[in-house]
Image (spheres, helix red, strand yellow):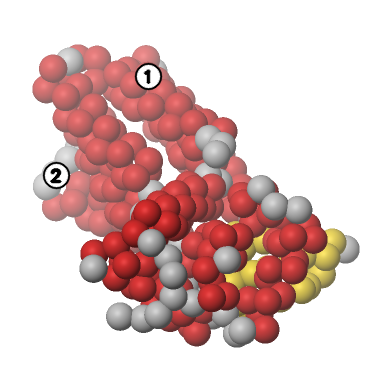
Amino acid sequence: MMDRNQALDDLKTIRQIMKRTQREAGRHGGWFILIAGVMWLVGFTANQFLPEKYAGLTWAVVNLGGMIAMIWAGIRLVKNGDIRTTMWKPIFFFWVILAAFAMLLGWLFGVNNSVQIGLLALLVAALGYIQIGAIFQSLHISITGILVAMLAVGAFFLMPDHFLLAMALLGGGLLIGSGLWMIRSRR
Amino acid sequence: MGELNPLIHQPTRLRIMAALVSLESDEKADFGFLRDLLELTDGNLSAHLQKLEEAGYVDIEKVFEGRRPKTWVSITAEGHDAFSEHVDALAKIIYN
């Protein structure tokens, strides 16, 4: 007959293993966050320092490169990943719908300068991270989203003249750091 | 409330089931992933998985991906129920 302490030990073991499994299974999501971080760093730096025309061109190149990198990372994960899942398609469509939603919001509210566009994109992306983190029970991804939203709003009000640079360095840096931390996090 | 399940009660199998139950419903774990996660040897993990498979608690799929053999492991609905009942039984011991 099992006593209370043994039962407590077993439940503790179950909790630890479940937590570790979820962390390890979600580790590869770090690559996508890392790629997004590099995109933000390059894109927002261009917004801060380059004329609008060239910044737009930079974003086009960054978006194309980032999309190719994410598709490549996705294919690698499907081929060599530790966890086989059919969730990639819904995740992809989730981000496409979210991007379309952001564009619709921008159009409806007449968002037309690079700072406002940047803030809107950041807040919608942060919402996406929070949602994805909630769906996959990954606290790291959700916290990254919350921090991105707080940074974006804070920088928008506290340093409006350097908002884009702040987002490049702080937002991009946060995503790159979070991505690296998730990839390298081991039990 | 369920009863303690003698098959799942074994410490290594308890850990295997806990790992599998925490994946999403459509997800399967690679054999090597489970082995490294639970710090087991190939033989040890194989033996315990076989017992769980015989009980209908896990599903084991051996495939070739390219030229590499790959073993995918997932929990069955029956395994889910059995694990939940086992956890309920543990809770019952603690709170009674």
Percent across and percent down for residue A186 are: 56, 37
Q: Is residue A121 visible?
A: no
Residue closest to the far right: B67
How far apart marks 1 and 2 lie (CA) works out to 27 Å
Secondary structure type for disc 2? loop
The residue shown at (14%, 44%) is A110
User: Which residue matches tag 2?
Assistant: A110
User: Which residue matches tag 1?
Assistant: A169
Answer with left or right where residue A173 lies relative to residue B9: left
Q: Is residue B19 visible?
A: yes
Mark 1 or 2, closer to the camera:
1
The numbered dot on residue A132 is none
- The residue type indicated by label 2 comes to Gly
Q: Image quadrant for the N terminus of chain A?
A: bottom left
The foreground one among A151 and A12 is: A12
The residue shown at (20%, 31%) is A150
The foreground one among B47 and A130 is: B47
